[in-house]
Image (spheres, grey):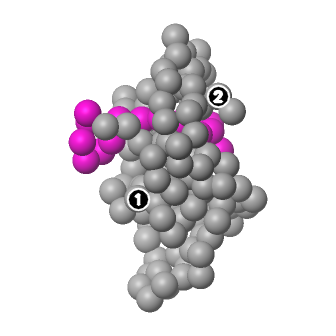
């Protein structure tokens, strides 16, 4: 079963620019769990009638830290060749830590300056994940 969607906004550039049409595999996680680096479609935390498109950064039971434009997972800096990390703006020096539960995931847009993601609204539950994007 597949879900067709269109990218809105710049949060996943350059990999998925605004206007690009994508397919999501809704059965991708039927027999396996979402993995770090997967690009997923999920029900919006703010408005369940809307969907979000982001990359998985943190997995269940991990500790994820965001500081100065970078993510650390369980104390190890995450290598993100796909990410556009802007120069930190005032206030980005502040350290933000998320301790994830058994069903929690941290997601972020590749274009960090223009992404509204887990850095703002916290982890998303596994139940909100609708599928994995086919690239």
Rendered position, 117 above or below 102:
below
For the view shown, which residue lies furthest in the front direction? Answer: 19
Residue 21, image x, y percentages: 56, 33
Helix, strand or loop at label 2? It is: strand
Classed neighbour count for the residue bearing mark 1: other residues with Cα under 10 Å, few (<14), some (14–19), many (≥20)? some
Rendered position, 28 above or below 120:
above
Rendered position, 54 above or below 34:
below
Bounds of the magenta segment: 34-49
Is residue 60 in view from this perspective? Answer: no
Q: Which residue is mark 1?
A: 116
Residue 57, image x, y percentages: 57, 51
Indicate the quadrant where residue 49 lies: top left
Q: Nearer the viewer, residue 68 or 1?
A: 1
Residue 46, image x, y percentages: 25, 47
Q: Which residue is mark 2?
A: 134
Residue at 26 percent of width and 36 percent of height: 48
Indicate the quadrant where residue 28 lies: top right
Q: Does 127 sit left or right of 133 as displayed?
A: left
What is the number of the mark on residue 18?
none
Q: Main secondary structure of the magenta part?
A: loop
Q: Does 98 sit left or right of 73 as displayed?
A: left
Q: Earlier in the sequence, mark 1 or mark 2?
A: 1
Residue at 33 percent of width and 56 percent of height: 121
Q: Nearer the viewer, residue 24 or 91?
A: 24
Q: CA distance from mark 1 to mark 2?
A: 22 Å
Residue at 69 percent of width and 33 percent of height: 135
Helix, strand or loop at label 1? It is: loop
Residue 50, image x, y percentages: 31, 37
Rendered position, 60 above or below 76:
above
Is 10 within the magenta? no
């Amino acid at each position: 079963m597949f879900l067709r969607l269109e990218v809105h906004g710049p949060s996943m550039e350059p990999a998925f620019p605004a206007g690009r049409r994508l397919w999501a595999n809704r059965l991708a996680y039927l027999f396996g769990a979402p993995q770090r680096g997967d690009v997923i479609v999920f029900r919006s935390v703010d408005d369940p009638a809307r969907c979000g498109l982001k990359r998985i950064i943190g997995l269940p039971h991990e500790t994820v830290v965001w500081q100065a434009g970078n993510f650390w997972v369980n104390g190890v800096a995450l290598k993100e060749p796909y990410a556009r990390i802007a120069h930190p703006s005032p206030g980005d020096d502040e350290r933000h830590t998320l301790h994830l539960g058994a069903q929690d995931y941290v997601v972020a847009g590749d274009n960090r300056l223009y992404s509204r993601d887990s850095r703002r609204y916290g982890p998303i539950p596994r139940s909100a994940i609708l599928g994995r994007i086919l690239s």
